[in-house]
Image (cartoon, helix red, strand yellow):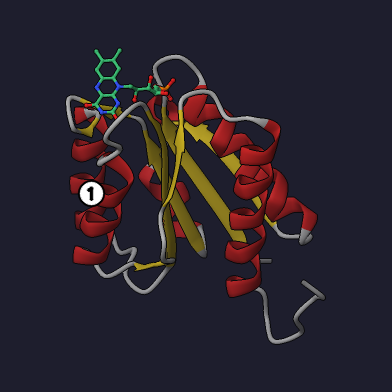
Amino acid sequence: MPKVVVVYLSTSGNTKAMAEAIVEGVKERNVEGHAVNFHEARIEDLQDADAIALGSSTFYYKMLPPMEKFIESLAKANVKAKVGAAFGSYGWSGEAPVMIAEKMREIGINVIDPVLRLQYQPTDKDLEECKRLGKDIANKIKPAKKEKM
Ligand SMILES: Cc1cc2nc3c(=O)[nH]c(=O)nc-3n(C[C@H](O)[C@H](O)[C@H](O)COP(=O)(O)O)c2cc1C
């Protein structure tokens, strides 16, 4: 059964809310999905997944440093050719998701374009966008039989 793992790093819960809504979207397509706080994420779970979404808020024009380290450790694991997505909440410049996507592509993950960036606390409409991304990810990893959009 295909599986999506969504790893997030969030200081005040905004990116976490995005991660949880992405997983809701994944599940609405009847695909297994888990949102995991970065501190609890295990590389083996990502190796087992068919798709990986990584999210961090933007701090000082970058992703949060532990996420950068995490992606570096992913580079040593075999996660090539998986489906990927990058996301994150931001305040005014929002570089983190773009940088996450770049790093994921460098290690061979097929990242969905565009990345998902939302300003501050997600609104209900924003959360719908997150769910949409979750559905898109699920559709990409589902076997041939596609559900209606
Ligand atoms: C110390 C600090 C630095 C920040 N630096 C940036 C920044 O460089 N660019 C930006 O877009 N947002 C910046 N932000 C805003 C956060 O990205 C924003 O509050 C975001 O919603 C936090 O999401 P989180 O709860 O998932 O961590 C900064 C916030 C703080 C507190």
Q: Amino acid at mark 1?
A: Met
Drawn side of residue 88 relative to residue 93, left or right: right
Drawn side of residue 40 relative to residue 136, left or right: left
Q: Position of residue 70 (x, y in %)?
A: 26, 39
Q: Position of residue 58 (x, y in %)?
A: 29, 30
Extreme-front residue of the structure: 92
Of the 4 image quadrants, the one containing the N terminus is bottom right
Crowding at dot 1, Cα within 10 Å, few <14 / some 14-19 / many 20+, comes out as: some
Check disc 1 and report the residue beneath it.
Answer: 99
Extreme-right residue of the structure: 148
Question: Residue 102's quadrant in the figure?
Answer: bottom left
Q: 144 or 63: which is nearer to us? A: 63
Q: Which residue is found at the position 23% from the left and 49% from the top?
A: 99
- Indicate the quadrant of ligand 1 in the picture: top left
Extreme-bottom residue of the structure: 144
Q: Which residue is found at the position 28% from the left and 49% from the top?
A: 100
Q: Which residue is found at the position 34% from the left and 63% from the top?
A: 79
* 83 up-or-down from 36: above or below: below
Q: Which residue is found at the position 69% from the left and 87% from the top?
A: 144
Of the 4 image quadrants, the one containing the C terminus is bottom right
Q: Position of residue 106 (x, y in %)?
A: 19, 64
* 90 up-or-down from 135: above or below: above
The CB of the residue at mark 1 lies under 8 Å from ligand 1? no
Q: 60 or 77: which is nearer to us? A: 60
Q: Position of residue 16 (x, y in %)?
A: 52, 28
Q: Find numbered disc 1 in the image and state the secondary structure of the residue it sits on.
A: helix
